[in-house]
């Protein structure tokens, strides 16, 4: 059985300031799984059942700062959520505030003053998340998307394949064949077309084999890194973030 840290930790930005919208994109390039959340009550309920996440609380919005202090203290004190990593975001930090959260309360994920700009904020957060092993043992964020209408079509000149994509990352895809014969391992498909809900992606892929999954046989393709530029990687990551954010929003709304 995989451990809880094998697949990384979900990183939540609670009542995120505007700069975090751009920072989250940079964090995605470093393969962190991030979410932007505006309901601290529902998030706390969710974390009670998933206490291996990390939360960065923007103490400038949502609640008065003293109430944020009480919220953070309760999150860290309650048994169900005591394992959650907590960090603080603010535009106007002071030595008194940073001392309170870092020393008196003892948050483990830092006190970040975001007025230093997008690039510097992202740099600080990447170092913090790496120190807290937020990636786990995985190298890439893998996004389950079997119910999202992601389709793959490919041809190697001898066979034409059509498949439904079950999960995707910048490393490759797992899919289920809708049409076509299973190719031999190591078959190269140039210009595979992956439709990310209307956003086209063309990339070279290598068929690496199959495995048995709950719903039947799953085919595995690895993307040829030489065919993936930064723009194509960003398409995959942006798509993945939208899928994961939508799924998390639905989970929180159900609480």
Image (cartoon, rainbow, N blue to C red):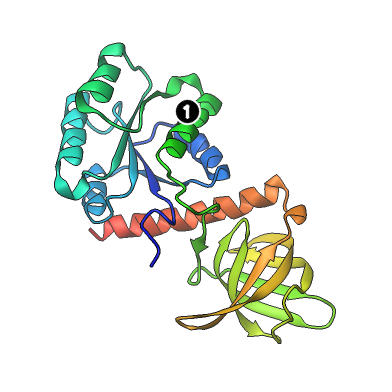
Which quarter of the rendered picture does the C terminus lie within?
A: bottom left
Identified at 42% across, 53% down, the residue is 245
Determine which quarter of the picture holds residue 254: bottom left
Dot 1 corresponds to which residue?
124
Kindly tell me whether residue 64 is visible in this rendering: no
Identified at 62% across, 81% down, the residue is 177
Tell me: 46 left or right of 222: left
Tell me: 51 left or right of 89: left
Identified at 43% across, 24% down, the residue is 114
Tell me: 38 left or right of 65: right
Q: How many marks?
A: 1
Q: Measuring from the top left, give residue 186's x and y in whole percent.
A: 75, 73
Kindly tell me whether residue 219 is visible in this rendering: yes
Q: Measuring from the top left, give residue 150's x and y in whole percent.
A: 58, 68
Which quarter of the rendered picture does the N terminus lie within?
A: bottom left
Residue 137 or residue 172, whichever sits in front: 137
């Amino acid at each position: 059985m995989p451990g809880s840290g094998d697949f990384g930790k979900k990183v939540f930005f609670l009542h995120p300031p505007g700069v975090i919208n751009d920072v989250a994109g940079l964090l995605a390039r470093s393969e962190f799984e991030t979410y932007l959340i505006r309901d601290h009550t529902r998030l706390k309920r969710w974390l009670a059942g998933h206490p291996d996440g990390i939360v960065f609380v923007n103490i400038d919005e949502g609640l008065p700062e003293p109430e944020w202090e009480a919220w953070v203290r309760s999150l860290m004190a309650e048994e169900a959520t005591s394992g959650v990593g907590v960090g603080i975001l603010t535009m106007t930090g002071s030595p008194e505030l940073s001392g309170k959260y870092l020393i008196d309360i003892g948050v483990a994920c830092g006190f970040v003053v975001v007025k230093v700009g997008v690039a510097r904020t992202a740099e600080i957060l990447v170092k913090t998340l790496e120190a807290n092993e937020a990636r786990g043992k995985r190298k890439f964020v893998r996004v389950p998307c079997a119910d999202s209408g992601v389709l793959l079509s490919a041809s190697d000149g001898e066979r034409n394949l059509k498949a439904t994509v079950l999960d995707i990352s910048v490393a490759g895809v797992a899919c289920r064949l809708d049409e076509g014969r299973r190719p031999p391992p190591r078959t190269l498909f140039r210009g595979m077309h992956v439709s990310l809900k209307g956003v086209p992606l063309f990339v070279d892929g290598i068929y690496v084999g199959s495995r048995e999954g709950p719903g039947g046989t799953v085919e595995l393709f690895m993307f040829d890194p030489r065919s993936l530029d930064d723009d194509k990687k960003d398409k995959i990551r942006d798509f993945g973030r939208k899928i994961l954010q939508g799924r998390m929003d639905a989970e929180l709304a159900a609480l």
